[in-house]
Amino acid sequence: MSDDPGLFEIMHTTRSMRRLKPDPVPDALIHKILEAGACAANGGNTQKWRFLVVKDPAIKKAVQVWYKKAFDEVVGPRYAASAPPPGATPERYKRQHGAVEYLTEHYHEAPVWIVACIDEGPNPPPRWAGASIYPAVQNMLLAARALGLGSTLTTRHLLFEAETDGALGLPPGVRSYAILPIGYPMGNFGPVGRGKLADFVYQDRWGQPYITE
């Protein structure tokens, strides 16, 4: 009998792990995570995704400067003024805010980043472009959790997209959609904090309650 957690347990316990140890992560584990990403659904199976693995401290620090600027100017004030989301108590939301601040300061210290990109060529991306990269991102988050590694989906760098894509050295036509900082977590995996399905799911008509048997 395998001791590995099952798929649904992994999904229900893949919390955002924002406090990561700086300890090295074996390349073999990153390879498994990338393979999981490449198994994901994508539009027309065109596989225009590109994944940039970043270990260089100088590159990560150059991006972290903009990541922190986005926190100081936009994200931090938003957190301070926002009510807890569905499924979160005020205390839990406060802890989340503290973890967000921690990640902001230590973003570049995560031993490995995976930058999820799409090679879009010269054409502006359509509204549905994310459908061809975010399923891969979720697969990689689940794979990291299954391997005992922590991560979180980050997109804040896109508030300064030109500057951060430039720091990452992305060529023309390639745009980043997310950065996954990956490392061994300082804390423990646990249940995600979400609202009830009744808060989000309708049946047949918008606003009509979803009825379960």
Image (cartoon, helix red, strand yellow):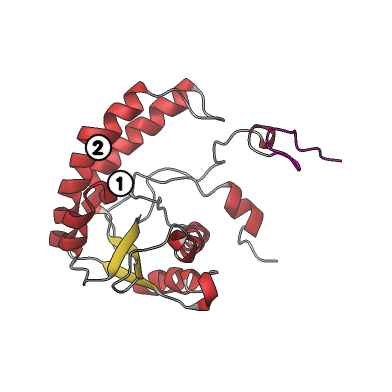
Q: In the rendered image, is residue 6 in sight?
A: no
Element class at badge 1: helix
Main structural element of the magenta stretch: helix, strand or loop?
Answer: loop
Circle 2 SS class = helix
Residues rendered magenta in the picture: 202-213
- Image vertical order of residue 25 relative to residue 119, above or below: above
Of residue 160 and residue 34, the one placed in the foreground of this image is 160
Answer whether residue 99 is magenta in the image.
no
Q: Which residue in the structure is indicated by mark 2?
A: 71
**Mark 2 or mark 1, which is nearer the start of the sequence?**
2
Residue 169 horizontal/vertical position (percent): 18, 68
For the residues labelled 1 and 2, the Cα–Cα distance comes to: 8 Å
Label 1 is placed on what type of residue?
Arg
Name the residue at 56% across, 47% down.
13
Residue 140 appears in the picture as rendered: yes
Q: Position of residue 73 (x, y in %)?
A: 21, 33
Numbered label tally: 2
Residue 90 drawn at (x, y percent): 46, 21
- Mark 1 — residue? 156
Q: Are marks 1 and 2 in contact (CB under 8 Å)?
A: yes
Give me the disc on residue 176: none
Asked whether 12 or 123 is in front, the reply is 123
Q: Residue furthest bottom?
A: 46
Tell me: 94 left or right of 189. Answer: left
